Every structure is written in structure tokens, then in C-alpha cells.
Image (spheres, rainbow, N blue to C red):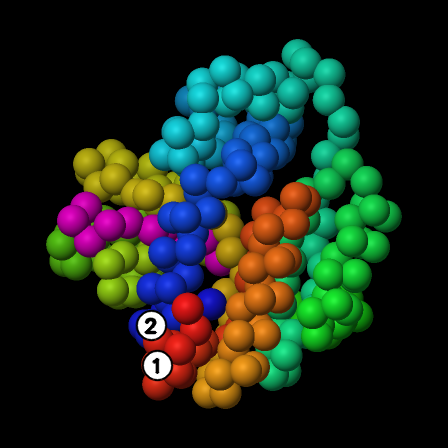
Amino acid sequence: MAGHNKWSKIKRTKAVIDAKRGNAFSKLAKELTLAAKAGGGSPDTNARLRSAITAAKAANVPNDNIDRAIKKGTGELASAALEEVLYEAYAPGGVAMMIEIVTDNRNRSANDVRVLLSKNSGTFADSGSVAYMFQRRGEIRLDKAAASEDQLMEAALDAGADDIADEGDDWVVYTPTDKLFQVSNALRDKNITSRSQQLIYQPQTTVTISDVATAKSLIKLYDILDDYDDTQHVHANFEIDDAIADQLD
């Protein structure tokens, strides 16, 4: 979701709260396993794994859990085979959604997501009917205290970043997908510490919701999908009109 409004702040606050809940550990563990499976168990040579470990430690995931998840990815411990699946959907207000799933049972997850959508005013979309509205990009988030705008811009753009955005309490660096970890590593080398690095689906255009009932319905669906055990990320192309944002608690 695009930033620069009150909904962005609400969403960031929710993310902090969710990080304290049990399902956040599960999502982080799956990312550790997938990263290790894709690039090996050494964070020194696997940038995706290094990023996943950083995120897990920031959420206070115990070291034993981190080690166990990595070993599942490298095959040192037995585990169910995980696969990444992407679902497209429509939500109230004509909003488009991209739902990233990690599952050991594709059919179960597809049925579960279909039920969650149908019970909350959403619908599955045909493959490709929503995806064209989003761009796959790398996203690096930093606290404002991590660097000045000039410092960040010089370091990030020199390393291959596309753009830098000011989102209130955060700096957000956008990169091409294949340069996410290159830029992140370059920032780290300059002692600019990021809070998270991930690949996202960034909406090309956004729908501004100004009706309270529609906004509440949207946020309810977003939360339900985000809380589903197999969900890794939910991306959507809506913003909430500042005039109604304070009515959404």
C-alpha cells in the first residue's frame, strides 16, 4: 500500500503489534527455511537468508528456532516440502490484492483462501487479471535516525536503487528485484542499518477509500488474510482517505 497518509501509520503500528503474536514466528520460520533451501545455510553467502535472520532476530525469535528453520531448508532436519504460491483477488471497493502464500498443501491453501474471501466480500481473480496492476520491486525500510536524506540517497542510488520515499517515521528505498540485497549490503557497509528488506508487489495506481463502511470491510478482509497461517504477505492497492482514518479504530 502506498504511504504518506494516516492509513500507512495505522498499518505500521499493526505490523509492530502482529510481530508480537505467534503467527509472526511461523511466517519468519518459513522464510528462513525457503531462503536456506534456495541459497544454502550460510548467511555469509546467502543474502536472502541473512535478511531473514535479521528480521527473525528483530522479532525476538529464539536462536534455536532460527537454527531449526535453517536446517529444515538445507535438509539437515526432515520437514514438509514448502512451496510459494501467489493468489490474485478483488476486495470491496474494487481494490486489487496479491496474496503471497507458503504452503505444504496447495489445494488446502487455495480452498482456505477462497473461503476467507467469499465470507468477507472478496473474490478470487483469474491469474493475470490483477498482477498487471502491481510492479515487483525490492523494498528496504529504515528508521529516519539511520541516515539523513542526503546520506541515504547518495549511498542507495550509487548502489543501484531506483528511488527513495519519505513515509513519515521511515525512509523507504526501492530497488530492482535483482539488486535488493546488493543495495542492502552497500548500505550496511556504510553503517546505514535497515530494519527490513523484502520483495514486494507495489501498486502502480491506488484506490482512495473515503467511505467508512467500505474501509472497515477492507481492513477486516486484509487482516483476516494476513492472519491466515499460510500467508506470508498481502499487497493491496488502496489508501484510506485521511478524513475517515481516525474512525477506523
Question: Label 1 belongs to which residue?
Answer: 242
Report if the CB atoms under discs 1 and 2 are less than 8 Å apart.
yes
Residue 135 forms part of the magenta stretch:
yes
Q: Specify whether residue 61 is in view.
A: yes
Give the image location of residue 2, x and y in percent.
Answer: 42, 70
Q: In the displayed structure, would residue 172 be above or below residue 159?
A: below
Q: In the displayed structure, would residue 33 be above or below residue 167?
A: above
Stretch in magenta: 133-147
Task: Sort mark 1 into few (<14), some (14-19) or many (20+) by Cα contacts within 10 Å.
Answer: some
Side of 146 where 197 appears, left or right? right
- Residue sticking out furthest to the top: 76
Q: In the displayed structure, would residue 68 be above or below residue 143?
A: above
Of pointers 1 and 2, the one earlier in the residue sequence: 2
Mark 1 belongs to which amino acid? Asp
Question: Label 2 belongs to which residue?
Answer: 6
Q: What residue is drawn where x is 64% and y is 24%? A: 73
Mark 2 belongs to which amino acid? Lys
Give the image location of residue 249, x and y in percent.
Answer: 41, 68
